[in-house]
Amino acid sequence: MKIAIDAMGGDNAPKEVVLGAMEAVKHIPNLHITLIGDQQTITPILSETSNIDVIHTDEVITAEDEPVRAVRRKKNSSLVQMAKQVKENKADACISAGNTGALMSAGLFVVGRIKGVDRPALSPTLPTQDGKGFLLLDVGANVDAKAQHLLQYAIMGSIYSENVRGIKAPRIGLLNVGTEDKKGNELSKKAFQLLKQAPINFVGNVEARDLLNGVADVVVTDGFTGNIALKTVEGTALTMFSMIKQTFMSNFKTKLAAGLVKSDLKGLKDQLDYSEYGGAGLFGLAAPVIKAHGSSNARAIFNAIQQACHMVEHNVTPTIQTTMETLQVEGEEE
């Protein structure tokens, strides 16, 4: 198993990326990692060189760079060189916590799409009350979408959830403004009909307020709506914990109470941290490409590596490709 990682991507790079990589090679058998980035800053952190190589490059795509232009002009950047490792079959998958738009552009222009997939989808796994989590796609790879794209997202999400997350017949929901069959705008109504006829376990429309209750294993929507839903969930969790902290730190009595429930609050915070489930997969590309959160620590990088390994081991990309080809043939026959 060979994984290429953009060592310079993210707020805590390269330190947390390198630490996460070292942790991964200790715990994941037969794993080889290639870190791409500035060797002078990586080497002092890299205390474990077994099964880890470094490819030096001093060019970096920053958060301020315009994604498409950066990928085309900064061909020697750590992110582009990482994608190139996959394109040239030197790596089975790749991971970056850097510029999301640039990673999506590199995925499209360097790694390439699966035949039959019109548009890739950015797909994180978000927490639920029961701890199982749910897959949300798309969260921003494409702000505009057609009903056919949502159908493809549902199929890819179902394959990933069944093969990687081990969920038999995952429940697929369509994010909407109500649960009734005929609710929503034209996109939602058209997508509903396509999903109803698709070879998936479609459970109908789902509302945003029910997402964290585990109403579905996979929730499908367009990238504009999905990104708003993702940021709302993330912002709500951060605000909630800030309010809880303020309450517990307000006086001596509440500070004593905080000391008693500190470990319980830590467990709750971890349960709501979607980086615990790995990164956001870019589904629909010719190989697994994982977008780790920009503020990823070593633990989050380790989880993203584990996620990428599972995608490779369980043949997620070939399965998506075969399924899409089968659907295309069936569509032509009809």
Image: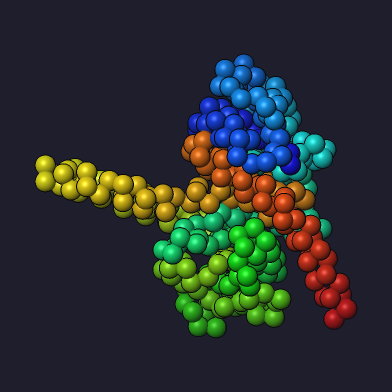
Residue 196: quarter of image: bottom right
Say if residue 73 shows up in the picture: no
Say if residue 233 shows up in the picture: yes
- Picture residue at 64% right of the left edge, 41% below the top: 28
Q: Residue furthest right?
A: 333
Q: Is residue 278 above or below residue 161?
A: above
The reply, left or right, for residue 98 in relation to residue 254 is: right
- Picture residue at 25% right of the left edge, 49% below the top: 261
Q: Nearer the viewer, residue 264 or 195?
A: 264
Q: Nearer the viewer, residue 264 or 227?
A: 264
Q: Residue furthest left?
A: 252
Q: Is residue 187 above or below residue 117?
A: below
- The N terminus: image quadrant: top right
- Picture residue at 41% right of the left edge, 49% below the top: 270
Give the colour scheme of this rendering.
Answer: rainbow
The image shows residue 278 at horizontal and vertical percentages of: 56, 48
Q: Nearer the viewer, residue 204 or 274?
A: 274
So how many labels did they put on this image?
A: 0
Q: Is residue 204 above or below residue 51?
A: below
The image shows residue 225 at horizontal and vertical percentages of: 52, 61
- Picture residue at 57% right of the left edge, 78% below the top: 203
Q: Nearer the viewer, residue 41 or 166?
A: 166
The image shows residue 208 at horizontal and vertical percentages of: 45, 67
The image shows residue 86 at horizontal and vertical percentages of: 77, 40
- The C terminus: image quadrant: bottom right
